[in-house]
Image (cartoon, grey):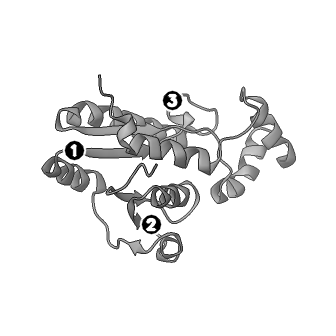
């Protein structure tokens, strides 16, 4: 079943990594997808439509959703937005801010039939992680080759989250399956 037929998605950061994975999965599920990314080249590789310019995505999106009678906003946070990590204070602070913003906006706009959630994955093997793994290893006093097995050992399933895992979760939250009808 196509879960996002007749839906329109605007994906910020959709030019690579998790964002690109979400764009591709949304398109497979029938959504029309527009990509916002700082790299036009990456955005153009991901999907047909690339939005240009700067704008306050959340305010503009909420205004439009209120006019049309509802919608869904999914923010990307992190497990670091729920639990702090030594030597990553700035990153954790930014992710806590996203989580707090999401909770506040969800409460504010629920009455307008606008559902707002944050996805909070752990480590995901993306091109960004490939750049960060050396820094992580150094800060944790580990060898680079020991980082992935260490992190996997901290997870009950003994595997890291994949881009596809997150994209499928995003589809669920964006779909009518997640409308919380009772």
Toward the viewer: 164 or 31? 31
On the image, numbered disc 2 is attached to which residue? 37
Between discs 3 and 2, the one toward the N terminus: 2
Number of the label disc, if any, that sits on residue 52:
none
Name the residue located 68 percent from the left edge and 52 percent from the top edge.
Answer: 132
On the image, numbered disc 1 is attached to which residue? 70
Between discs 1 and 3, the one toward the N terminus: 1
Q: CA distance from mark 3 to mark 2?
A: 26 Å
Q: Cβ–Cβ below 8 Å for labels 3 and 2? A: no
Circle 2: is it few (<14), some (14-19), or many (20+) Cα within 10 Å? many
Q: Is residue 129 toward the left or the right of residue 153 in the image?
A: left
Number of the label disc, if any, that sits on residue 82:
3
Name the residue located 61 percent from the left edge and 38 percent from the top edge.
Answer: 122
The mark lying in front, picked from 1 and 3, is 1
Name the residue located 63 percent from the left edge and 57 percent from the top edge.
Answer: 128
Instruction: Tell me if residue 78 can be seen.
Output: yes
Instruction: Return the residue found at the far top.
Output: 182
Above or below 40: residue 56: above
């Amino acid at each position: 079943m196509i879960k996002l037929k007749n839906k329109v998605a605007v994906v910020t950061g959709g030019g690579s990594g998790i964002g690109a994975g979400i764009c591709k999965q949304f398109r497979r599920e029938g959504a029309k997808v527009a990509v916002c990314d700082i790299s036009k080249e990456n955005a153009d590789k991901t999907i047909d439509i690339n939005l240009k310019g700067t704008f306050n995505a959340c305010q503009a999106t909420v205004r439009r959703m209120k006019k049309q009678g509802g919608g869904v906003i999914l923010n990307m946070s992190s497990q670091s937005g729920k639990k702090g990590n030594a030597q990553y204070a700035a990153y954790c602070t930014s992710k806590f801010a996203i989580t707090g913003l999401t909770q506040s906006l969800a409460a504010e706009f629920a009455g307008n039939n606008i559902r707002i959630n944050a996805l909070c994955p752990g480590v995901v093997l993306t091109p960004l992680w490939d750049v960060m793994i050396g820094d992580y290893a150094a800060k944790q006093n580990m060898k680079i080759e020991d980082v992935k097995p260490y992190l996997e050992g901290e997870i009950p399933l003994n595997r890291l989250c994949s881009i596809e895992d997150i994209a499928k979760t995003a589809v669920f939250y964006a779909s009518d399956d997640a409308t919380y009808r009772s």
